[in-house]
Amino acid sequence: MLVLFLLLGITTSTPSPAAADGGAVPVVNPFSYFCNSTAVRRTYLPNSTFAANLASLAAALPMNASISGGGFSAGVFGSPPDAAYGLVLCRGDYGGPACASCLESRFRDADSFCPYSSDVTVYHDQCQLRFSDRDFLAGAGAGGSNLPESVAWNMNNVSGRNAAAFDDLVVRLVGAVADAAGNAKGRYATGQAGFARERTNVYALAQCTPDLTPAQCRACLAGLIAQVPTWLKGRVGGRILGVRCDVRYENDLFFARTSDMVTLTPLVDTSKGQSPSS
Ligand SMILES: *[C@@H]1O[C@H](CO)[C@@H](O)[C@H](O)[C@H]1NC(C)=O
Ligand SMILES: *[C@@H]1O[C@H](CO)[C@@H](O)[C@H](O)[C@H]1NC(C)=O
Ligand SMILES: *[C@@H]1O[C@H](CO)[C@@H](O)[C@H](O)[C@H]1NC(C)=O
Ligand SMILES: *[C@@H]1O[C@H](CO)[C@@H](O)[C@H](O)[C@H]1NC(C)=O
């Protein structure tokens, strides 16, 4: 099941428009979406009760997330079989009105890319959402609720002789950042490490929905980190995203720097010489 979703993630994903992604592919927005059309695609009618519930959800969640939710909101409008369940999450450094407007755009993306689908997930650089006619909010820590997951990578590779050491550094950094995210109140943390052999730095982010306990968050992230060697071997950047938790690393700074960043190894001065991404 998991692998199937991951493969779908790849086919529906393209590298993000971030500068770190090499520029070799077209810029696509949103970065990744799922209409849940693989099994049985469930659709709703324009004038249905579900459509009205979904409209209420799409109005409430971005507001709640940006005003009181710290970038997160989850809830339900209506009751089965017409209930609309939803969850939204903004990246930890992306709050306030920018968060609300990012999420509003993602609800519009859902309309454009998955018209009348009653189960949609959209991932974007700064925010993400899922809504469904089924209750995917129950059992947040149980493990199944991170689906659908999405994987994407930077097209550039670390040179062969350094790849194993770089991959090892990435897994250690992402693991340390995941530990910090689990313990942080907002369940969001970032980190950095220098990789002197290639005169490059690596920056990483880990985030969970803040309603997860520290242990649930760490377990969700561990599930993603375990897949890093499978999908991101030798890549200078990559991400594995889920509805409940996300990890990402790049060789450019892609989030707001803060004083509490995890620093694993001293940063190197990338201003001299070639960085592998250039
Ligand atoms: C939806 O309802 C409006 C107002 O009742 C009606 O004019 C319209 O034709 C309906 N659309 C569909 C697709 O049923
Ligand atoms: C939005 O936030 C308000 C106030 O915190 C809360 O009462 C309400 O249940 C929230 N609604 C949703 C859909 O999250
Ligand atoms: C699609 O919906 C089914 C329920 O009908 C659910 O089990 C499955 O996880 C969903 N898949 C995705 C990719 O959202
Ligand atoms: C990176 O490595 C992958 C897998 O070996 C390869 O398919 C890809 O072409 C490489 N990318 C570049 C930019 O050389």
Image: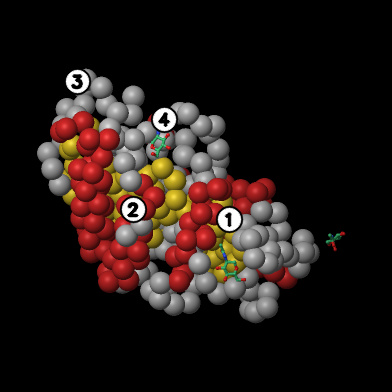
Q: Position of residue 144 (x, y in %)?
A: 45, 71
Tell me the residue at 34%/53% (across/down).
Answer: 228
Name which quarter of the figure residue 183 lies in: bottom left
Quadrant of residue 206 in the image?
bottom left
Q: CA distance from mark 2 to mark 3?
A: 30 Å
Question: Relative to the observer, which residue lies in front, 82 or 5?
Answer: 5
Tag on residue 34? 1
Which residue is rendered at x = 25% and y = 52% of the image? 171
Q: Residue at x 21, y 48 (%)?
A: 168
Q: Tell me the mark number nearer the camera, choosing from 2 and 3.
A: 2
Marks 1 and 4 sit apart, C-alpha to C-alpha, by 24 Å
Contact between marks 1 and 4 (CB within 8 A): the answer is: no
Residue at mark 1 to residue at mark 2: CA–CA distance: 21 Å
Q: Within 10 Å of the Cα at label 3, are there few (<14), some (14-19), or many (20+) other Cα atoms?
A: few
Q: Secondary structure at mark 2?
A: helix
Q: Provide residue 177's location: percent of width, then percent of height.
A: 24, 54
- Label 4 or label 2, whichever comes before in sequence order: 4
**Residue 172, horizontal then vertical, whole percent:** 20, 52
According to the picture, the residue beneath numbered tag 3 turns out to be 272
> x%, y% of residue 135?
55, 74
Q: Looking at the image, tell me whether mark 1 or mark 2 is earlier in sequence order.
A: 1
First of labels 2, 3 by sequence position: 2
